[in-house]
Amino acid sequence: MNGSFYELIEDIKLKQFILTEIQPYRSQYVELTEEGWKVKHNFLSEHLIECAVRGIGAAIGYYHSSVIKVVGIEIDDHEGSGWADTKSASYLWFLYNELTGYLPVPSLLFHSPHGLHCYWILITTLPTQLIIPLIKERLKPLNNIEVKPTMTEALRIPERKRAIDPRSGDSLHSIDFTELVTYDPIDVIGISCDPSDFRKTLSERKASLRSFIGSLAIERVEEQYTSFVDGSSNKALNHLVPVYKKVGLSVDEAISRITSKLDVSPLYSLYGELRNPTRLKKRIESYYRNRSSVNSFTTKSEVLSKKDRKIIDTLVAIHPWAKQRTKPIQKFLENLFGWLKYHEKIIQNKLYSAMFDYLYPFYHKNMREGYIPLPGSVMSKWNDRYNQIVSWLIKIHFLEPAPYPYAPAQGICRYYKVNQEYKSAETYKNI
Protein backbone atom coordinates (compact mmCIF):
# COMPACT_ATOMS: atom_id res chain seq x y z
CA MET A 1 0.00 0.00 0.00
CA ASN A 2 1.28 3.45 -0.87
CA GLY A 3 2.82 5.09 2.23
CA SER A 4 0.94 8.39 1.95
CA PHE A 5 -2.36 6.59 1.31
CA TYR A 6 -1.74 4.34 4.34
CA GLU A 7 -1.13 7.42 6.52
CA LEU A 8 -4.30 9.06 5.21
CA ILE A 9 -6.33 6.00 6.25
CA GLU A 10 -4.77 6.12 9.73
CA ASP A 11 -5.53 9.85 10.01
CA ILE A 12 -9.16 9.29 9.03
CA LYS A 13 -9.50 6.55 11.67
CA LEU A 14 -8.36 8.97 14.38
CA LYS A 15 -10.69 11.66 13.06
CA GLN A 16 -13.63 9.23 13.27
CA PHE A 17 -12.63 8.29 16.82
CA ILE A 18 -12.67 11.96 17.80
CA LEU A 19 -16.09 12.48 16.20
CA THR A 20 -17.79 9.36 17.56
CA GLU A 21 -16.09 8.76 20.93
CA ILE A 22 -14.67 12.07 22.14
CA GLN A 23 -17.62 13.97 20.62
CA PRO A 24 -16.16 17.49 20.98
CA TYR A 25 -18.30 20.59 21.38
CA ARG A 26 -18.80 21.71 17.77
CA SER A 27 -20.00 25.33 18.09
CA GLN A 28 -16.68 26.78 19.29
CA TYR A 29 -12.98 25.93 19.25
CA VAL A 30 -9.56 27.55 19.70
CA GLU A 31 -6.88 28.14 17.07
CA LEU A 32 -3.15 28.71 17.55
CA THR A 33 -2.13 32.05 16.02
CA GLU A 34 1.02 34.16 16.20
CA GLU A 35 -0.49 35.89 19.27
CA GLY A 36 -1.28 32.58 20.96
CA TRP A 37 -4.47 30.54 21.31
CA LYS A 38 -7.57 32.43 20.14
CA VAL A 39 -11.20 31.43 20.65
CA LYS A 40 -13.15 30.95 17.40
CA HIS A 41 -16.93 31.19 17.67
CA ASN A 42 -17.35 29.07 14.56
CA PHE A 43 -18.38 25.50 13.77
CA LEU A 44 -15.73 22.85 14.40
CA SER A 45 -16.10 21.02 11.10
CA GLU A 46 -14.91 17.53 10.16
CA HIS A 47 -12.50 19.18 7.73
CA LEU A 48 -10.88 21.21 10.52
CA ILE A 49 -10.57 18.11 12.70
CA GLU A 50 -9.02 16.11 9.87
CA CYS A 51 -6.50 18.89 9.11
CA ALA A 52 -5.54 19.05 12.80
CA VAL A 53 -5.12 15.27 12.96
CA ARG A 54 -2.91 15.35 9.85
CA GLY A 55 -0.89 18.35 11.11
CA ILE A 56 -2.01 20.58 8.24
CA GLY A 57 -2.53 24.29 8.89
CA ALA A 58 -3.01 25.89 12.31
CA ALA A 59 -3.28 23.77 15.45
CA ILE A 60 -6.87 23.45 16.71
CA GLY A 61 -8.10 22.92 20.27
CA TYR A 62 -11.50 21.53 21.24
CA TYR A 63 -13.84 21.78 24.23
CA HIS A 64 -15.94 19.04 25.77
CA SER A 65 -19.70 19.07 25.33
CA SER A 66 -22.02 18.64 28.35
CA VAL A 67 -21.34 14.88 28.39
CA ILE A 68 -18.06 13.00 28.48
CA LYS A 69 -16.94 9.50 27.53
CA VAL A 70 -13.21 10.13 26.98
CA VAL A 71 -11.32 11.82 29.83
CA GLY A 72 -8.31 13.89 28.76
CA ILE A 73 -5.31 15.02 30.81
CA GLU A 74 -2.48 17.32 29.73
CA ILE A 75 1.03 16.96 31.15
CA ASP A 76 3.01 20.12 30.43
CA ASP A 77 6.39 21.33 31.69
CA HIS A 78 5.54 25.04 31.58
CA GLU A 79 9.01 26.18 32.67
CA GLY A 80 11.03 23.73 30.58
CA SER A 81 11.56 23.34 26.87
CA GLY A 82 9.45 20.21 26.36
CA TRP A 83 11.08 17.53 24.24
CA ALA A 84 13.84 19.88 23.07
CA ASP A 85 16.32 18.67 25.68
CA THR A 86 16.95 15.49 27.64
CA LYS A 87 16.35 17.03 31.06
CA SER A 88 12.87 18.34 30.17
CA ALA A 89 11.95 15.08 28.42
CA SER A 90 12.99 13.09 31.50
CA TYR A 91 10.86 15.35 33.69
CA LEU A 92 7.81 14.81 31.45
CA TRP A 93 8.17 11.03 31.75
CA PHE A 94 8.59 11.43 35.50
CA LEU A 95 5.27 13.31 35.62
CA TYR A 96 3.66 10.61 33.48
CA ASN A 97 4.85 7.88 35.87
CA GLU A 98 3.48 9.92 38.79
CA LEU A 99 0.14 10.21 37.04
CA THR A 100 -0.10 6.47 36.38
CA GLY A 101 0.40 5.98 40.10
CA TYR A 102 -2.97 7.68 40.60
CA LEU A 103 -4.79 6.50 37.48
CA PRO A 104 -4.51 3.39 35.28
CA VAL A 105 -2.44 3.39 32.10
CA PRO A 106 -4.22 5.59 29.51
CA SER A 107 -6.16 4.13 26.60
CA LEU A 108 -4.34 6.54 24.25
CA LEU A 109 -1.21 8.66 24.57
CA PHE A 110 0.20 11.42 22.32
CA HIS A 111 3.15 13.72 22.71
CA SER A 112 2.53 17.43 22.15
CA PRO A 113 5.20 20.05 21.43
CA HIS A 114 5.68 20.65 25.17
CA GLY A 115 4.25 17.62 26.90
CA LEU A 116 1.93 14.63 26.80
CA HIS A 117 -1.80 14.23 26.21
CA CYS A 118 -3.43 11.23 27.88
CA TYR A 119 -6.89 9.80 27.19
CA TRP A 120 -8.99 7.28 29.14
CA ILE A 121 -12.02 5.80 27.38
CA LEU A 122 -14.93 5.16 29.76
CA ILE A 123 -17.47 2.39 29.28
CA THR A 124 -20.29 4.92 29.56
CA THR A 125 -21.09 8.59 29.00
CA LEU A 126 -21.44 10.88 32.03
CA PRO A 127 -22.15 14.60 32.67
CA THR A 128 -18.94 16.57 32.08
CA GLN A 129 -19.38 19.13 34.83
CA LEU A 130 -20.14 16.42 37.35
CA ILE A 131 -17.11 14.31 36.45
CA ILE A 132 -14.33 16.87 35.86
CA PRO A 133 -14.35 18.21 39.47
CA LEU A 134 -14.05 14.64 40.80
CA ILE A 135 -10.98 13.91 38.68
CA LYS A 136 -9.40 17.26 39.55
CA GLU A 137 -9.93 16.50 43.23
CA ARG A 138 -8.27 13.11 42.80
CA LEU A 139 -5.20 14.60 41.08
CA LYS A 140 -4.85 17.64 43.35
CA PRO A 141 -1.44 16.49 44.78
CA LEU A 142 0.17 16.44 41.30
CA ASN A 143 1.90 19.41 39.64
CA ASN A 144 1.95 20.35 35.95
CA ILE A 145 -0.96 18.00 35.28
CA GLU A 146 -4.32 19.43 34.17
CA VAL A 147 -7.64 17.79 33.37
CA LYS A 148 -8.41 18.97 29.83
CA PRO A 149 -10.48 19.56 27.90
CA THR A 150 -13.44 20.80 29.95
CA MET A 151 -16.44 22.84 28.85
CA THR A 152 -14.37 26.02 29.36
CA GLU A 153 -10.76 24.90 28.76
CA ALA A 154 -9.64 23.53 25.41
CA LEU A 155 -7.11 20.83 24.55
CA ARG A 156 -5.18 20.60 21.30
CA ILE A 157 -6.49 18.01 18.85
CA PRO A 158 -3.74 15.38 18.66
CA GLU A 159 -1.78 14.75 15.49
CA ARG A 160 -1.95 11.07 14.59
CA LYS A 161 1.79 10.85 13.90
CA ARG A 162 2.44 11.84 17.54
CA ALA A 163 0.77 8.69 18.94
CA ILE A 164 2.79 6.78 21.57
CA ASP A 165 2.38 3.35 23.11
CA PRO A 166 1.06 4.12 26.65
CA ARG A 167 3.12 1.29 28.17
CA SER A 168 6.44 1.33 26.32
CA GLY A 169 6.59 4.98 25.21
CA ASP A 170 7.50 3.92 21.67
CA SER A 171 6.03 5.72 18.65
CA LEU A 172 2.93 4.10 17.11
CA HIS A 173 2.58 4.00 13.35
CA SER A 174 -0.92 2.54 13.59
CA ILE A 175 -3.65 2.64 16.26
CA ASP A 176 -5.95 -0.35 16.56
CA PHE A 177 -9.08 1.36 17.84
CA THR A 178 -10.84 -1.99 18.31
CA GLU A 179 -8.25 -3.01 20.92
CA LEU A 180 -8.12 0.17 23.02
CA VAL A 181 -8.60 -0.39 26.75
CA THR A 182 -11.85 0.99 28.18
CA TYR A 183 -12.37 1.70 31.87
CA ASP A 184 -15.17 1.65 34.38
CA PRO A 185 -15.53 5.19 35.81
CA ILE A 186 -14.57 3.87 39.25
CA ASP A 187 -11.03 3.24 37.93
CA VAL A 188 -10.57 6.78 36.63
CA ILE A 189 -12.99 8.93 38.59
CA GLY A 190 -13.67 7.01 41.75
CA ILE A 191 -17.38 6.34 41.15
CA SER A 192 -19.09 3.27 39.77
CA CYS A 193 -21.49 3.60 36.87
CA ASP A 194 -22.58 1.49 33.94
CA PRO A 195 -24.72 2.14 30.86
CA SER A 196 -27.84 0.76 32.55
CA ASP A 197 -27.56 3.54 35.13
CA PHE A 198 -29.35 5.88 32.75
CA ARG A 199 -32.19 3.37 32.47
CA LYS A 200 -32.74 3.32 36.22
CA THR A 201 -35.88 4.79 37.68
CA LEU A 202 -35.74 8.41 38.77
CA SER A 203 -35.66 7.45 42.45
CA GLU A 204 -32.73 5.07 41.83
CA ARG A 205 -30.78 7.77 39.96
CA LYS A 206 -31.44 10.23 42.78
CA ALA A 207 -30.11 7.73 45.31
CA SER A 208 -27.03 7.04 43.17
CA LEU A 209 -26.34 10.75 42.71
CA ARG A 210 -26.76 11.49 46.42
CA SER A 211 -24.39 8.65 47.22
CA PHE A 212 -21.33 9.81 45.32
CA ILE A 213 -21.93 13.56 45.74
CA GLY A 214 -22.41 12.94 49.45
CA SER A 215 -19.13 11.05 49.59
CA LEU A 216 -17.34 13.94 47.91
CA ALA A 217 -18.89 16.50 50.30
CA ILE A 218 -17.85 14.44 53.34
CA GLU A 219 -14.34 13.96 51.99
CA ARG A 220 -13.88 17.70 51.42
CA VAL A 221 -15.09 18.81 54.85
CA GLU A 222 -13.17 16.06 56.67
CA GLU A 223 -9.96 17.14 54.93
CA GLN A 224 -10.32 20.45 56.79
CA TYR A 225 -10.89 18.78 60.18
CA THR A 226 -8.75 15.66 60.42
CA SER A 227 -8.67 15.88 64.24
CA PHE A 228 -10.02 17.94 67.14
CA VAL A 229 -8.06 20.60 69.02
CA ASP A 230 -8.91 22.29 72.31
CA GLY A 231 -10.67 25.61 71.75
CA SER A 232 -11.94 24.83 68.25
CA SER A 233 -14.14 21.74 68.73
CA ASN A 234 -17.36 23.77 68.28
CA LYS A 235 -16.11 25.17 64.96
CA ALA A 236 -15.30 21.64 63.76
CA LEU A 237 -18.73 20.32 64.78
CA ASN A 238 -20.47 23.27 63.11
CA HIS A 239 -18.85 22.29 59.81
CA LEU A 240 -18.87 18.50 60.04
CA VAL A 241 -22.27 17.56 61.44
CA PRO A 242 -24.45 19.68 59.06
CA VAL A 243 -22.71 17.98 56.12
CA TYR A 244 -23.32 14.53 57.62
CA LYS A 245 -26.98 15.45 58.06
CA LYS A 246 -27.28 16.96 54.58
CA VAL A 247 -25.97 13.83 52.82
CA GLY A 248 -28.24 11.52 54.80
CA LEU A 249 -26.02 9.94 57.44
CA SER A 250 -27.83 8.77 60.57
CA VAL A 251 -27.04 10.17 64.03
CA ASP A 252 -25.17 6.95 64.89
CA GLU A 253 -23.10 7.19 61.69
CA ALA A 254 -22.24 10.80 62.49
CA ILE A 255 -21.22 9.82 66.03
CA SER A 256 -19.00 7.07 64.63
CA ARG A 257 -17.19 9.46 62.29
CA ILE A 258 -16.65 12.06 65.05
CA THR A 259 -15.45 9.37 67.46
CA SER A 260 -12.89 8.11 64.94
CA LYS A 261 -11.49 11.66 64.73
CA LEU A 262 -11.39 11.98 68.51
CA ASP A 263 -9.30 8.79 68.62
CA VAL A 264 -6.55 10.53 66.64
CA SER A 265 -6.77 13.92 68.42
CA PRO A 266 -3.84 14.17 70.88
CA LEU A 267 -4.33 17.96 71.10
CA TYR A 268 -7.89 17.57 72.40
CA SER A 269 -8.26 17.17 76.17
CA LEU A 270 -8.82 13.68 77.57
CA TYR A 271 -11.61 15.26 79.63
CA GLY A 272 -13.12 17.25 76.77
CA GLU A 273 -16.91 17.34 76.46
CA LEU A 274 -16.95 15.38 73.20
CA ARG A 275 -15.11 12.42 74.72
CA ASN A 276 -18.19 11.81 76.89
CA PRO A 277 -20.41 9.50 74.75
CA THR A 278 -23.64 10.84 76.27
CA ARG A 279 -22.71 14.50 75.74
CA LEU A 280 -21.47 13.80 72.20
CA LYS A 281 -24.75 12.11 71.27
CA LYS A 282 -26.82 15.00 72.66
CA ARG A 283 -24.71 17.55 70.77
CA ILE A 284 -25.12 15.75 67.45
CA GLU A 285 -28.84 15.10 68.01
CA SER A 286 -29.34 18.85 68.52
CA TYR A 287 -27.94 19.49 65.04
CA TYR A 288 -30.30 16.91 63.53
CA ARG A 289 -33.33 18.40 65.31
CA ASN A 290 -32.73 21.87 63.84
CA ARG A 291 -34.46 22.13 60.47
CA SER A 292 -32.50 23.41 57.52
CA SER A 293 -33.34 26.96 56.47
CA VAL A 294 -32.49 26.23 52.85
CA ASN A 295 -35.47 25.90 50.49
CA SER A 296 -35.20 24.12 47.17
CA PHE A 297 -37.20 26.87 45.49
CA THR A 298 -39.47 29.71 46.48
CA THR A 299 -42.56 31.21 44.87
CA LYS A 300 -42.67 34.26 47.14
CA SER A 301 -43.59 37.47 45.36
CA GLU A 302 -40.08 38.96 45.66
CA VAL A 303 -38.70 36.50 43.07
CA LEU A 304 -41.20 37.69 40.47
CA SER A 305 -40.58 40.82 38.42
CA LYS A 306 -43.13 43.52 37.64
CA LYS A 307 -43.35 42.12 34.14
CA ASP A 308 -44.10 38.64 35.52
CA ARG A 309 -46.83 40.13 37.72
CA LYS A 310 -48.33 41.96 34.77
CA ILE A 311 -48.52 38.75 32.70
CA ILE A 312 -50.04 36.84 35.63
CA ASP A 313 -52.66 39.53 36.23
CA THR A 314 -53.59 39.50 32.54
CA LEU A 315 -53.98 35.73 32.42
CA VAL A 316 -55.97 35.65 35.67
CA ALA A 317 -58.35 38.27 34.27
CA ILE A 318 -59.26 36.14 31.23
CA HIS A 319 -59.41 32.60 32.64
CA PRO A 320 -62.53 30.75 31.40
CA TRP A 321 -63.73 29.29 34.72
CA ALA A 322 -65.96 30.36 37.58
CA LYS A 323 -64.95 33.31 39.76
CA GLN A 324 -64.17 31.10 42.77
CA ARG A 325 -61.27 29.56 40.83
CA THR A 326 -59.51 32.91 40.31
CA LYS A 327 -57.31 32.75 43.41
CA PRO A 328 -56.20 29.12 42.83
CA ILE A 329 -55.33 29.96 39.20
CA GLN A 330 -53.35 33.01 40.30
CA LYS A 331 -51.49 30.82 42.79
CA PHE A 332 -50.77 28.24 40.07
CA LEU A 333 -49.30 30.92 37.77
CA GLU A 334 -47.19 32.39 40.59
CA ASN A 335 -45.80 28.92 41.25
CA LEU A 336 -45.15 28.44 37.54
CA PHE A 337 -43.14 31.66 37.29
CA GLY A 338 -41.28 30.81 40.51
CA TRP A 339 -40.44 27.38 39.03
CA LEU A 340 -39.22 29.07 35.85
CA LYS A 341 -36.91 31.40 37.84
CA TYR A 342 -35.59 28.43 39.79
CA HIS A 343 -34.56 26.57 36.63
CA GLU A 344 -33.03 29.71 35.14
CA LYS A 345 -30.67 29.70 38.15
CA ILE A 346 -29.98 25.96 37.83
CA ILE A 347 -28.97 26.18 34.18
CA GLN A 348 -26.48 28.97 34.99
CA ASN A 349 -24.71 26.73 37.53
CA LYS A 350 -22.70 24.18 35.55
CA LEU A 351 -22.40 21.64 38.35
CA TYR A 352 -26.10 21.73 39.27
CA SER A 353 -27.04 21.70 35.59
CA ALA A 354 -24.99 18.51 35.12
CA MET A 355 -26.61 16.98 38.21
CA PHE A 356 -30.08 17.68 36.78
CA ASP A 357 -28.95 16.28 33.42
CA TYR A 358 -28.04 13.06 35.23
CA LEU A 359 -31.34 12.90 37.12
CA TYR A 360 -33.51 14.02 34.19
CA PRO A 361 -32.13 12.86 30.82
CA PHE A 362 -31.94 15.65 28.19
CA TYR A 363 -32.52 18.36 30.82
CA HIS A 364 -29.61 20.55 29.67
CA LYS A 365 -30.40 20.08 25.98
CA ASN A 366 -34.07 20.94 26.43
CA MET A 367 -33.32 23.94 28.63
CA ARG A 368 -30.91 25.30 26.01
CA GLU A 369 -33.77 25.10 23.52
CA GLY A 370 -36.01 27.05 25.87
CA TYR A 371 -38.10 24.17 27.25
CA ILE A 372 -38.46 23.80 31.02
CA PRO A 373 -39.54 20.60 32.80
CA LEU A 374 -43.09 20.68 34.20
CA PRO A 375 -43.63 17.36 36.02
CA GLY A 376 -47.18 16.45 36.94
CA SER A 377 -45.97 15.57 40.44
CA VAL A 378 -44.93 19.22 40.93
CA MET A 379 -47.94 20.88 39.27
CA SER A 380 -50.39 18.72 41.23
CA LYS A 381 -49.11 20.46 44.39
CA TRP A 382 -49.96 23.81 42.85
CA ASN A 383 -53.46 22.82 41.75
CA ASP A 384 -55.15 19.41 41.66
CA ARG A 385 -56.79 20.34 38.35
CA TYR A 386 -53.52 21.37 36.75
CA ASN A 387 -54.30 19.40 33.56
CA GLN A 388 -57.18 21.76 32.78
CA ILE A 389 -55.03 24.85 33.38
CA VAL A 390 -52.16 23.53 31.26
CA SER A 391 -54.52 22.67 28.39
CA TRP A 392 -55.92 26.22 28.50
CA LEU A 393 -52.43 27.78 28.58
CA ILE A 394 -51.48 25.69 25.55
CA LYS A 395 -54.66 26.73 23.75
CA ILE A 396 -53.85 30.45 24.16
CA HIS A 397 -50.21 29.81 23.15
CA PHE A 398 -48.80 30.76 26.54
CA LEU A 399 -47.28 27.27 26.85
CA GLU A 400 -45.74 25.37 23.93
CA PRO A 401 -45.18 21.60 24.43
CA ALA A 402 -41.74 20.31 23.51
CA PRO A 403 -41.69 17.96 20.49
CA TYR A 404 -40.04 15.19 22.50
CA PRO A 405 -41.42 11.94 23.94
CA TYR A 406 -42.77 11.68 27.47
CA ALA A 407 -41.13 8.73 29.30
CA PRO A 408 -41.83 8.91 33.06
CA ALA A 409 -40.16 5.55 33.78
CA GLN A 410 -36.85 7.03 32.58
CA GLY A 411 -37.37 10.29 34.47
CA ILE A 412 -38.30 12.19 31.28
CA CYS A 413 -41.22 14.45 32.17
CA ARG A 414 -43.12 16.82 29.90
CA TYR A 415 -41.25 19.96 28.84
CA TYR A 416 -42.83 23.26 27.81
CA LYS A 417 -41.69 26.61 26.46
CA VAL A 418 -43.16 29.54 28.40
CA ASN A 419 -44.08 32.61 26.37
CA GLN A 420 -42.80 35.40 28.63
CA GLU A 421 -43.62 38.21 26.21
CA TYR A 422 -46.40 40.40 27.52
CA LYS A 423 -49.65 40.31 25.55
CA SER A 424 -52.83 42.20 26.18
CA ALA A 425 -55.96 40.42 27.35
CA GLU A 426 -57.56 41.20 23.99
CA THR A 427 -54.71 39.45 22.16
CA TYR A 428 -55.18 36.27 24.21
CA LYS A 429 -58.96 36.35 23.66
CA ASN A 430 -58.50 36.55 19.89
CA ILE A 431 -56.28 33.47 19.74
Image (tube, rainbow, N blue to C red):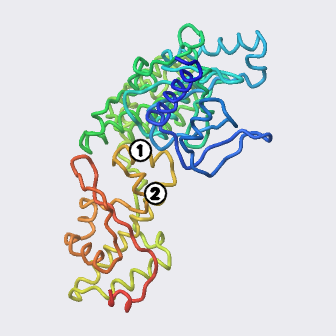
Q: Quadrant of residue 330?
A: bottom left
Tag 1 or tag 2, which sits nearer the N-term? 1
Residue 225 visible in the picture: no
Dot 2 surroundings within 10 Å: few (below 14), some, or many (20 or more)? Answer: few
Q: Residue furthest bottom?
A: 426
Is 235 placed above or below 223 here?
A: below
Image coordinates for residue 255, horizontal then vertical, percent? 37, 28
How far apart are the alpha carbons under marks 2 and 1? 15 Å
Which residue is more in the foreground, 307 or 81? 81
**Which residue lies most toward the top here?**
168
Name the image quarter holding the C terminus.
bottom left
Return the mark for residue 368: 2
Q: Quadrant of residue 389?
A: bottom left
Tag 1's secondary structure? helix
On screen, residue 33 versus residue 337, left or right, reads: right
Label 2 sits on a secondary structure element that is: helix
The amino acid type, in three-letter code, at marker 1 is: Met
Image point 42% across, 57% down: which residue?
A: 367
Tell me residue 212's x, y (percent). Answer: 39, 33
Task: Tell me: residue 97, above or below residue 373.
Answer: above
- For badge 2, the amino acid type reads Arg
Q: Which residue is mark 1?
A: 355
Q: Nearer the viewer, residue 211 or 184?
A: 184
Q: Residue at x 64, y 23 (%)?
A: 75
Q: Badge 1: few (under 14), some or many (20 or more) residues near its Cα, within 10 Å?
A: many
31 w.r.t. 71: above or below: below
User: How far across and down, in percent of the image, does residue 160 sit?
Assistant: 58, 24
37 relative to 354 in the view: left or right: right
State the mark number for residue 152.
none
- Residue 137 percent across, percent down from the top left: 54, 29
Front-most of 228 and 370?
370
